Image (tube, rainbow, N blue to C red):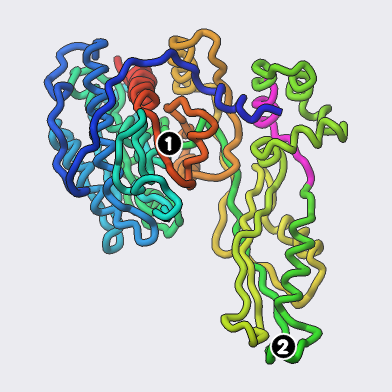
Amino acid sequence: MHSRLLLLLLITTAACAHRAMPPLAGPSSAPVLETPARAAIIAAPTAGDWKGLGDEAIALLSQYLRINTTNPPGNEIAAARWLAQVLQRDGIEARIFEPAPGKANLYARLAGDGSARPIILLNHMDVVLASPEYWSVDPFSGLIKDGYIWGRGALDMKGEAIAQVMTLLALKRAHVPLKRDIIFLATADEEIGAGVGAAWIVEHQAGLVKDAEFLLNEGGLTRSDEKSPFWLDVTAHGTAGHGSRPTPDNPVHRLVRALDRIANWQTPLSVTPAVERSFRDLAVVARDTMVRRWLSDIRTALRDSEAARAITADLTYNAVLRNTISITGLKGSDKTNVIPPVATAAIDVRLLPGQDPAAFLADLTRVVGDSAVTIRPQGPNWPATESSTETEMFRAITAVAHARDPHALVATLMLPGFTDSHYFRRMGITSYGLGPFPLTQGDSRGVHGNDERVSLEALRVGVRFYYDVVSRVAAK
C-alpha cells in the first residue's frame, strides 16, 4: 500500500520561482514589514503581484512563528494583537475577545454586498509543545533557511492562517467586488479544547458567524468529515502497601492486565459511505493493479483476509475503517517502594460517524472483564460530523485544482483526528478541512513533531490556492 497516495488528493503543482529571504531579526512583537506588495493593487493580482504577495507571506509567517503560543498556557492574546495589527495596516478592523486572561479570539470581516452568505476562514493561534533539545533549530525562531520556514505552527496552523490573511489583503487591495462577506476567525485552545476558543465563539458570539454558508479550516487534505474523540480514563483499584510485600490485588498489575486486553482488542472494520467513496477515488491513482482493485471495492476487499491485512497495514487507512484506541498516559505510584491504592491510564479513542459512545464503552468494559477496573469519559464528547460535497465551495476547490493540473484528483478522506469544524457544522455551516500546501510525506511529519517547517514554494502555492478558491466563490 502506498500511503503517499494521500498526498495526491488535493493538487499537484509545477514549481514556483521564489527568492530565499534572510532570517528576520527581532522579538515576536516586531512590527509588520513594509514590502512592495503592500502598494495598492488596482486590478486582480498579476504575476508580479503574486511574487510580492508571496514575499510578504514569507515575512509575515516568519514573524508569526516567533510568537510562542504553546498551549498550555497559550498566550493567544499576543498572537491576536499581532494579527489585528497586520489587518489594520490595510484598513481591516478586527475585534479581540478575551474570555479568560491571556486567552483570545480574533474576528475580522471583509464586507461584500450581502447577496450571498459569508465564508468563514477559521484558524487557531495556539500550538503544541516543542522540545528544543529535539529540534535542529530554535522552534520559535521563524528561521528561513534551506528553502523552508522553520517553527512550531508552520503547518499546524499558523502557515494556513497566513494564507488566509493574504487572501483578505489581496481581495481588499484589488478592490474585488464581493457578493459574500469574508470572515477571518482566529481562535484559542484548539490544541487542548478548554472551551474558550471556537466553542466560546459559538456559545457567546454566535451572531457573528451564524449567517455563514461555508467554512474553510485545517485538515491536511480536502476533508468533509472527521471522527469523534472519546477520551477515556481507566482506573484500577486495589490495596495500598509497601513494595517489599507484594499484594494479590496490586492495582498497577490489574491495570497492566486491563491495558494488555485493550491493546490486543481489534475493533471491527466498518465502511462508512464517505470512506467507501474516498477509497473509490483513491483507486484511480493506485499504481498496483491489485491495490487498485481492492480500493475500488473496499467492502469486498475487506472480506478477504490478505487484502484486509494489507489495507489496514496503512495507518491512515486503518484509522478511517475502524474505531481506534491509543493508550497514551500511565500513572501509578510516585515512589518506587509504595504500592498505590489506584493506578490510572488515559486512552485516546476516535469513533467513526454513527457510532454510539455508550455502546463502545460497554464493549470496552466487557473486553477488560474486571469489576475493579473502571472506565469513564474524561469529558463531554460529540458525534462525528460530515459536510456534503455537492456544494459551490467544493466545486470551486475542484476547479482551482484542475486549473493547475488537469489530472489532479480531488477527493475526500475522513480525518482520523478532529478539528474545531464540528462546532460550526452543528450550526448548519458547510465546513471543509483544506490543505493548501503541497507537502512531501516527510514534511507532513512535522505536524506535532520535531523540526516542523513549510517550504517557501509551498507557502507561495498555498497563498495563491486560497485566494483562487475564495475569490471564485465570493466574487461577483
Which percent across, then down, holds residue 317?
68, 35
The quarter of the rendered structure image containing the C terminus is top left
Q: Nearer the viewer, mark 1 or mark 2?
A: 2
Mark 1 residue type: Asn
**399 falls in the magenta region:** no
Q: Quadrant of residue 307?
A: top right
Residue at 27% x, 46% y: name it: 66
Residue at 60% x, 31% y: name it: 413
Which percent across, then down, holds residue 52?
22, 20
| Relative horizontal placement of residue 81, taking residue 209 as reference (left or right) | left
Which percent across, then down, holds residue 464?
34, 20
Circle 1 sits on which residue?
217
Q: Quadrant of residue 381?
A: bottom right
Tell me the crowding category of disc 2: few under 14, some 14 to 19, or many 20 or more residues within 10 angstroms, Cα based: few
Task: Name the secondary structure under disc 1.
Answer: strand
Residue at 78% x, 24% y: name it: 294
